[in-house]
Amino acid sequence: MEKAATTFFSLALVLMLMHCFVALAGGAANYTSSDESALLAFKTHITYDPNHILATNWSTNTSFCNWVGVSCRHRGQNRVTSLDLSHMDLKGSIPPQIGNLSFLTYFNISYNHFNGHLPAELGQLRQLKVFDLYINDFSGEIPSSIFNVSAIQWIDVGNNSLSGSLPDYLCSHLPKLTVLWLHFNEFSGDIPSHLGECRELQKLSLYGNKFTGFIPREIGNLTQLKRLVLGGNNLQGMKV
Ligand SMILES: *[C@@H]1O[C@H](CO)[C@@H](O)[C@H](O)[C@H]1NC(C)=O
Ligand SMILES: *[C@@H]1O[C@H](CO)[C@@H](O)[C@H](O)[C@H]1NC(C)=O
Ligand SMILES: *[C@@H]1O[C@H](CO)[C@@H](O)[C@H](O)[C@H]1NC(C)=O
Ligand SMILES: *[C@@H]1O[C@H](CO)[C@@H](O)[C@H](O)[C@H]1NC(C)=O
Ligand SMILES: *[C@@H]1O[C@H](CO)[C@@H](O)[C@H](O)[C@H]1NC(C)=O
Ligand SMILES: *[C@@H]1O[C@H](CO)[C@@H](O)[C@H](O)[C@H]1NC(C)=O
Ligand SMILES: *[C@@H]1O[C@H](CO)[C@@H](O)[C@H](O)[C@H]1NC(C)=O
Ligand SMILES: *[C@@H]1O[C@H](CO)[C@@H](O)[C@H](O)[C@H]1NC(C)=O
């Protein structure tokens, strides 16, 4: 009698564990396919890949964690943490699915020919620390959602064709920002007056844009600042 009960409970336990395992496996498949499909969407938005790097290497035959330029976190589900496609001579645009790479901390596509507008979904990348688009052909505005990613430390969009004005609250949610390179674009309007709230800012370049108005006094609050480049604009000096 007692033995039968024990057997019954053991069986129940095994079934329960199996159920858990199936649930976990299902979850894993889901997360994996979400990151994989985001990368595949990225691949389909590449219009020129002269060395066939992504065309041959980003194959579903192997885990996306082995794809060139992709690094993953292997704890728990495999999630993309880094995407480095710098210096690959690529043309294309960034699809909105990029926002699904929710563990992405490092995004570097510098020295390419990416174009089009930046998707607002970039603002969903809550863990993003590095955002490097230096030397590409992006146009339109920087989606303001990016200035809500409070983990961000490094923004380099230098040498693109980005335009529009920067939001006044630019620094209100970016306490960790250390580098802000905006040089050689077509940004206009005033320099955001709340710049002083980027307490950790060390390097700031607005060179070669169409900024107008006064240089905000709050720049003097940036005690970590080592490099400040404001030339090549239509600025009027310091307001007194
Ligand atoms: C997988 O993702 C879909 C769509 O996001 C969702 O509806 C479904 O509940 C998920 N399944 C599991 C097991 O998490
Ligand atoms: C893709 O590139 C990575 C890194 O260079 C390499 O380890 C891997 O074997 C390549 N995979 C394919 C399918 O070519
Ligand atoms: C992927 O698998 C298919 C079918 O097995 C094969 O034809 C193809 O060459 C493989 N591609 C790579 C990059 O290994
Ligand atoms: C990924 O992103 C796209 C576009 O932002 C969205 O429609 C889709 O539901 C997202 N989720 C998955 C699992 O692909
Ligand atoms: C991005 O990639 C370029 C080229 O490989 C490199 O020089 C640069 O330091 C990288 N940016 C960051 C912020 O790591
Ligand atoms: C930024 O975050 C604030 C507070 O969470 C929210 O009210 C606002 O809509 C967000 N802005 C954008 C552009 O995502
Ligand atoms: C950046 O843009 C400026 C102005 O268009 C140009 O003079 C400079 O050569 C560019 N730098 C690089 C490295 O492409
Ligand atoms: C920031 O700068 C402004 C204007 O120079 C000044 O009034 C204010 O006290 C400063 N704030 C801090 C926290 O240093």
Image: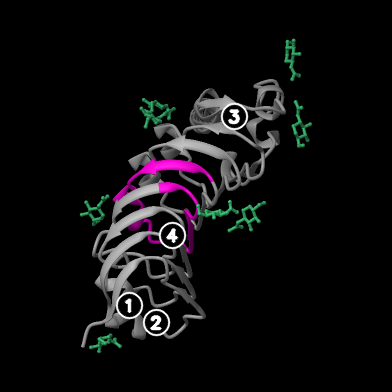
Q: Residue furthest left?
A: 240
**Which residue has dot 4 on it?**
182
Q: Are marks 1 and 2 in contact (CB under 8 Å)?
A: yes
The residue type indicated by label 2 comes to Leu
Q: Quadrant of the C terminus?
A: bottom left
Q: Are marks 4 and 3 in contact (CB under 8 Å)?
A: no
| Tally of numbered tags | 4
The residue type indicated by label 4 comes to Leu
**Which residue has dot 1 on it?**
196
The residue drawn where x is 43% and y is 61% is 208
The residue type indicated by label 1 comes to Gly
The region drawn magenta spans 136-161
For the question of whether residue 108 can be seen, the reply is yes
Vertical position of residue 121 compared to residue 40: above or below? below
Q: Are marks 4 and 2 in contact (CB under 8 Å)?
A: no
Q: Nearer the viewer, mark 3 or mark 1?
A: 1
Alpha carbons under labels 1 and 4: distance apart: 17 Å
Alpha carbons under labels 1 and 2: distance apart: 6 Å
Secondary structure at numbered mark 3:
helix
